[in-house]
Amino acid sequence: MWDKLRTHYAQVADRRFETLVDAARAADFTAQTGDMRLDYAKTNIDAHVRALLIDLLDQTDVAAKREAMFAGAPINETEGRAVLHTALRNLDGGPVIVDGQDVMPGVLDTLARMEGFAADVRAGRFVGQGGPITDVVNIGIGGSDLGPAMATKALAPYHDGPRCHFVSNVDPADIAAVLRVCDPATTLVIVASKTFTTIETMSNARTAQAWMSQTVTDTGAQFAALSTAADKTAAFGIDPSRVFGFEDWVGGRYSMWGPIGLSLMIAIGPDAFRAFLRGAQAMDRHFQAASWQENLPAMLALVGIWHNQICGYATRAVLPYDNLLSRLPAYLQQLEMESNGKGVSMDGADLAVESGPVVWGEPGTNGQHAFYQLIHQGTRVVPCEFLVAARGHEDDLHHQHQLLVANCLAQSEALMRGRTLDEARAKVADAFEGDELERQARHRVFKGNRPSVTIAYPQLTPEVLGQIVALYEHRVFVEGVVLGINSYDQWGVELGKELATELQPVVEGKETAAGKDGSTAALVDFLQSHGVS
Ligand code: F6P
């Protein structure tokens, strides 16, 4: 099934797709749901390529697998689990059955408990030893950090609750910087960990406990936990009334819609959090109902597959022209790379195609003054994904927002059009002549023909953020199915964790580095000679 696409690519690879982009293509090579628009007209995908890409969806049974996911089938086959983050936002939907039981009553009950707790914290009914809560510290890592941290930043204009801080790294610099600005007597610590075993999170939680116990008599009373492991949260000393549980059918990197989103809910309030869920649910419905060509997650996935698996572009830049989304690239790195960065297909065979791409990025316009040089003139093609809002939240500074939007559109246009040698010569003709003119002109050539997509929306509201995140989640699902990958396990994180456990006593000087490779042993030596042990 890949051969036809490769053959066609060989025929069109050198075509300048700019010549395809007229008004009709602009209408045809977009997909829209509500007022969110995905424009993929600035790519080398033509109607024939699109049809071949859509064939991939049919050949790999994406529709049936999509329904299996929503229905609670154990599509995470290596762990024998359902994949049901969609149930967490199934606010007004029907039952969702896992192992013969409807999970929705439990989901809605936990949501109501979270709302009650968040409302109490926000209203000052839940207090610390020193009075109403002024600061919330979410301690978690990976999916227990990146989602809520990204969303809390993204929805900053909606904050009307206590300050929220996020601590993830085991590097003590992270937690020290946060605790330094908090008053233990008015701080709520939320320990967010699906497993409640993650070493970074548990180390930071114990550090926070020790910090608080210097001032607060009943530290347990100012701790809450978000986890699937009720036995472990109890052993840590957190009262069940402040434990918000979820099931193993919520993957860590898909978990911010439920308890892992508690810090976000405290920051923006239960109503805005529900709006966030509703936005995601709207995208779920669109993903389930829209034809492939109109389907934003499916088309975004197919554009990615075209660029990565067919054109061979190994990375993808995510470039939000929306500073509120500054943590989106980091969030997507986990969502996409932990989900689809795998070399073995569901049946255990080596993957026949490349795995998912390297995802990276920074907000525009900042990136323009840093790495866009390579995107425009480097030898490798980097497909770009722009996100842009029609309006910001600073009405009095809308003229600056207009400048932001102009920059976003200019970048995708520049990537596509480029600048020819003749145009470059004209630019420098006044300043140089002869060979020097030629040399100077060549430095100013942009090859162009570089693809990008643009996701445009009216304003970054809680609903729109929910839509954006669900769009990316479903894109990952589609990409995983087409590539034959299980997007919902993460065995690739295990080896490093095991070796770190082995190395800890070596670093501490309690064991020797015997048996370690020469490089590792020498690095331990060096760090020990400078005080690590
Ligand atoms: O090590 C990877 C990982 O398991 C991620 O998948 C997960 O989001 C993160 O660690 C944190 O896990 P937990 O929520 O169980 O602490």
Image (spheres, rainbow, N blue to C red):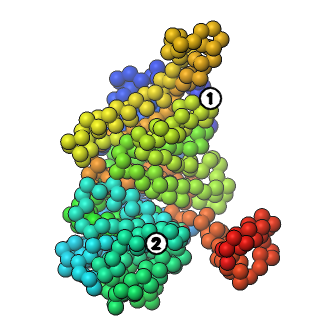
User: 433 or 6: nearer the eye?
Assistant: 433
Q: Which mark is residue 10?
A: 1
Q: Residue at x 62, y 47 (%)?
A: 354
Q: Is residue 119 above or below residue 18?
A: below
Residue 177 % position (x, y): 44, 68
Residue 330 % position (x, y): 47, 55
User: 325 or 230: nearer the eye?
Assistant: 325
Q: Earlier in the sequence, mark 2 or mark 1?
A: 1
Report the residue marked by disc 2: 176
* Amino acid type at image mark 2: Ala
Residue 220 % position (x, y): 36, 87
Q: Secondary structure at mark 1?
A: helix
- Nearer the observer: mark 2 or 1; the answer is 2
Q: Residue at x 37, y 77 (%)?
A: 189
* Amino acid type at image mark 1: Ala
Q: Residue at x 38, y 35 (%)?
A: 408
Q: Is residue 203 above or below residue 82?
A: below
User: 350 or 178: nearer the eye?
Assistant: 178
Q: Is mark 2 within 8 Å of ligand 1?
A: no
Is disc 2 surrounded by few (<14), some (14 to 19) or many (20+) residues within 10 Å? Answer: some
Q: Secondary structure at mark 2?
A: helix
Left or right: residue 364 compared with residue 93: right
Q: CA distance from mark 2 to mark 1?
A: 55 Å
Residue 271 visible to the viewer: yes
Looking at the rendered structure, the number of numbered marks drawn on it comes to 2
